[in-house]
Image (tube, rainbow, N blue to C red):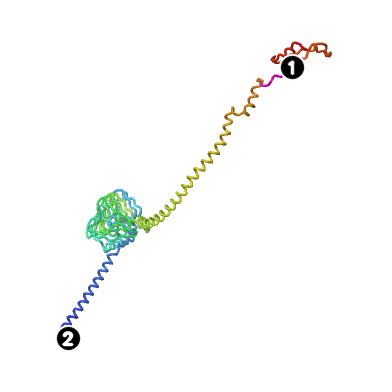
Amino acid sequence: MKLPTYAPTLGRLRLSVLAVSAALVVSAGGLLVTGGDAQAAAVAVPLGTDESFVVLAGAGITNTGPTVLTGDIGSFPNPAITGTGTMTITGTNHAGDNVTQEAKKDLVTAYNVAAGESPPTPITDDLGGKTLTQGVYNSASSMGLTGALTLNAEGDAGAVFVFQAGSTLTTASSSSVVLTNGAQACNVFWQVGSSATIGTATQFRGTVLALASITMNTGATAVGRMLARNGSVTLDTNTLTKPTCSTTPPTTPPTTPPTTPPTTPPTTPPTTPPTTPPTTPPTTPPTTPPTTPPTTPPTTPPTTPPTTPPTTPPTTPPTTPPTTPPTTPPTTPPTTPPVPTVSPRPPQVTRTPGGPVGTGDASGLSILLVGPPTFPWFWGIVAGTP
């Protein structure tokens, strides 16, 4: 029996379909893996013994002017450190001792970890004016900062920012790195392929891991570290403070979102409706009617009648003496005794003996009239008529 001539062709077609399908699956898997990697966040760079250093160099440290350093310093293999007379160091100057040598080994490891973090977000222009969230940011060549760069942790105290510069990192004068919403300088890393220059009066944040050298121009400040693997570190009237990480979640971001929504809705609705209606209606009606009527009527009548009568009688009589008879007699008699107000008394007779005492002879009797001679019959008696 002769097989159809198209059978091998059909078989090959089936194999081709399977191969294409497998290729698509593999491609899809690759896309999925790539997608998963794209979601990976940056991780903190392990510094080891470099944690205690604020300045570490390979070819010496040079300082000009009053510089304040909070943290340890050291250099190896060239241990030369000049300008220490105008340095204020809150830490230890390890120069080229064993601590510095160990720190230099850890610096190599930290540099390589920072350079290998991925997946990176490309940076093709100046960082000034940008606001970036946690992640890895890469420039194949130089990286510049003019103005302000804002790093927003979005409320995550552990948010990590890694910047990878293929060659140089340069900040313009008076530039700044601003940390917001919980971002911390201890979680910001700058891996530089050659040298870094921090411009005059720049306010910098983060740890610089430079393959070659680092220069801080006059008045530049940093909360971070200046770690140069092979070159020198040059300082000029700077202030550098070793950063420390806080495990406490940021107060501003978490507090504002959670507090405002929950507090405002529950508090305002329940409090306003229940309080206003019950308080206003019940309080206003009962208080106004009972208080106004009872107070005005009862107070005026009882007070006016009882008060006026008792007060007027007792007060008026004493002030009007002429109209009261009983009051005048007791007062007038004692003060007016000489005025006679009664009828004339009967006449008094004085006997004058006309003869010898004891004879009883009254022939010599004469009468003396006392009182006003207003009656004629008295004159006869005076004339001696017996």
For the N terminus, which image quadrant? bottom left
Residue drawn at the location 35% of the way across and 52% of the way down: 90
Hey, what amino acid is under mark 1?
Gln
| Label annotation for residue 3 | 2
Does residue 244 appear in the picture of this structure?
no
Spatial CA distance of label 2 from label 1 is: 206 Å
Q: Farthest residue in the bottom direction?
A: 1
Q: Residues within 10 Å of mark 1 (few under 14, many from 20)?
A: few
* Residue situated in front as seen by the camera: 82 or 297: 297
Which quadrant holds residue 34?
bottom left
Q: Main secondary structure of the magenta part?
A: loop
Nearer to us: label 2 or label 1: 1
The picture places residue 340, in percent across and down from the top left corner, at 66, 20
19 to the left or right of 309: left
Residue position marked by numbered label 1 in the rendering = 348
Hey, what amino acid is under mark 2?
Leu
For the C terminus, which image quadrant? top right
Does residue 132 appear in the picture of this structure?
yes
* Residue situated in front as seen by the camera: 118 or 321: 321
Identify the magenta region: 341-350
Provide the secondary structure element on which disc 2 rests.
loop
